[in-house]
Image: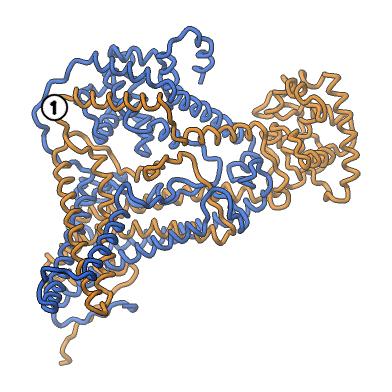
Chain colours: A orange, B blue
Amino acid sequence: MLPADCSRRLVAELRDALDACAERQRQLDRSLRVSRRLLRTWEPAETPAPQPTPGPETSEEAPSPECTPSSQELKELELLTQALEKAVRVRKGISKAGERHRALSPKSGSTATSASTASAPSRASGQAGCRVSETKPPRGIQQNVVPARGLPECRLLSAGDRTRVGRGAGVTKPGPGLGDQQTPPSAGLRAPEAFTLKEKGTLLQLPMAYRKAASRNSRLWAQLSSTPTGDSVDAATAAKTQFLQKMRMTAGGPSSGLSAAEVDAEVGPLRKACSLLRQRMEEALSAAPADGVQEFHRLLTLEGLQAITEQCLHRLQELRAAVVGQQPGPCPEGRRPRASLPCGGGTAPLWSPQLLLYSSTQELQTLAALKLRVAMLDQQIHLEKVLMAELLPLVRAQEPQGPHWLALCRAAHSLLCEGGQRFPTILRDEPAN
Amino acid sequence: MGRRRRRVDREAAVGPLPEAIATLSRTLPAGPSPEIFRRAKFDRPEAAPALWRLLFHVLSLLSANGASASAAQEAQVRMVKSELRSQGYPRRALAQLPEDGSQGSRELLLALAWLLARGPLLERLLAQTRVPLGDEIPLFEGVSLVPLECDALARPSPSAPHVEADGPMDIRHLQWLMGKLLFQWRKLITSQQEQCALLGKIHTYTRGCHSDRSLGHLSVAETELLRDAEGGQQLLRRLERENARLEAALQWRCRELVFWRWMDTVLGTCPPEASHPTFLPRIPERGTGELELVARELQALQEELRGAVESRRAAWEARVGGWGPEWNAVQWASWEAVGHELAALQQAWEPGGAAAQPHGPCRLVKSDAGASRGPGLRAAQVIGVLRSREACLEAVLCQLQRQCRQELAKLAGALPGLIWILPSGH
């Protein structure tokens, strides 16, 4: 049995580790759900489509009267559908049957939008007129189209859309992407063709609004990351420094030294230093010097390592002293994960993500597995140190002849030396008689 | 963001200071209006709640804490105070503010300015709340599985809701927890592998779709945007909000000087703090644990080195007959070489160190091998770095386990009449 406080601490530690794992697992599960859903057949949207009535997020009743009645647009619609008909005839051989979902609901909707926005000529006028439909499924338009023709519009539209996509005219409007899944079925046409990413993924196109916002976003981030220079910057920096100094001076009394955050910041490097020094030491000790020169080299190395270790210890004592002199007060509750904010090593930090190029799924899996392994090793090492700090003293202190000592020893061995995966066997060596 | 529209109207009428403050407020998440700032200068109580909320929000983001935004007022106040203290906030007046959050607007304003002055606060906040458009993987930093601040050696009680009965516990419970942890890890690995496979597929299936050529294919977020209209709208809105904040942050860089001048006046309106005697010494909960662990390790290392050095020096001196007054050229060369090596070694952990490792999240992009030009990291390279880190950590773990084995063997060896059969593999 372990004493209460010791077991409490160890259990707390292990539970923290379990919680961290569970959190990571939850995040992974969420991502898995999303990814799996994307790779399955995409469902047409939930609302019963055939109704001309608006779906949840749109109020096409409002925009449609604005958009549909325009005779100019009707004419253009007419032109467009003729063009699309032609396109269908041309592409009939290529396109598979019944893939009005090929472009994915967004596409067909987008074509409908483009129909309303007067594809070829003045996109501007159409765009202005149907700005609303840019973000809403132009169901009104669709309805216009539907009664007008008995053709398989959707097939038409999607085929036509493909030409647009191919030309990259950018006419395909964002509307589709954003909520148009209801439109194709709404035309009340043939049974919805399943859309799968596998077959038709390459035909997807991002909505214009998104594209604009995303490129603006990356541009702004790039600007933010570039180190600003100039007089105004220098003046601002000077003003800030001055302000900080004044703050310190008005603080009434000498500063208390290092803040907790600063202490924390140093502990990490010291830990790293320790492990690197140890590694170096082991390398030096394990090498077999061939001659006097190498022996001398080794001796100097070891002495140098010793000096550095003492420096580190000295710094540690300083930190300890600073920590002791801290102001009292309540502590932040719970644990704090490593503050994971991107800060470059002195150079201008990259605030937005870099690209990481991988060439095959295998490579990605290896990368991710290694990352996970490194994190796990980190955790394991931490647990190992904590267990050592708690269990070894217990084993030392307990009475070896006691009944529980063997059990404790065996369990400690398994936890400390085998990572909890294997156990030693202990046999009593009784004399045969 | 309604601020912006009104601001445009008033632009002609407002001076540089309100403009600067308005810009600041637009950049901050949940930024209060410039009026609040103005009132805070005069320490008006009505400005206090908004500022407490703001600081709570900002500090939770900074510490990457999962602090719930719906925490009670007192909890928020306490959190703000303790967080600022641990960051080293110099003024004591903050600690003396009442916990009901009804006062202290000027002090909070000073605290905000202090945070702003110390580092790239706005950029960090923006980075924390960034809308992830791509499939990201954090590299070398990011949420670690180790609770860094957890002080195992001085914790009062577990914070977990399911507290076990306090009291002596069977060590088998620990073993059980350990086993559970191992199982969790294995599950994580499999889930992770599956996720990667799915990502690979999605990236392949959507190749050529992205308007940005350097990316080439859609990410999960973008594909999801196409599949789910509602979600897509939300994403777009968030993106636009972020863009607005980014723009404000860039504008702030041009306008902040007048703000700092104004802050000087704010500081001037504060009564001088009475000089207090020394603080009560206290060992804070956090931090000692880690310090202690590291201290122990370093001390152990020091011992070993001492032993190693002494024995080898004695051997060397016996061999060479003591240090002569002159070293020969070879010896000097060795000395220099060792000096360089150790200096390089030290660089590896010094904060300003050479290791310009990629930090932060990276966006995954699938591109066929051969894309050797262009910006971005290559997976192969990162894998190399990770492998060496893995090897390093494995060595550390092995060494720790070896240490334990030796220790336990020593203790067990004291007992005669027992045969220890260690698990195979050793």
Residue B268 visible, this angle: yes
Where residue A152 sits in the image (x, y, percent)?
86, 39
Rendered view: B126 above or below A377? above
Q: Quadrant of residue B320?
A: bottom left
**Number of marks in the image?**
1
Name of the residue lying farthest toward the bottom: A433
Tell me the subunit letter for badge 1: A
Q: Residue at x 47, y 59 (%)?
A: B383
Identify the residue at image location x=58%, y=59%: A361
Q: Residue extending furthest top?
A: B13
Left or right: where A299 falls relative to B194: left
Quadrant occupied by the C terminus of chain B: bottom left
Disc 1 marks which residue? A253
- Name the secondary structure under disc 1: loop
| Amino acid, disc 1 | Gly
x then y, percent, for residue A431: 15, 89
Horizontal placement of A375 versus B77: left or right?
A: right
* Residue A358 at x, y percent in the picture: 56, 55
Can see residue A411? no
Q: On the picture, is B120 further left or further right than B319?
A: right
Is B100 positioned to the left or the right of B259 in the image?
Answer: left
Q: Position of residue B308 (x, y in %)?
A: 17, 70
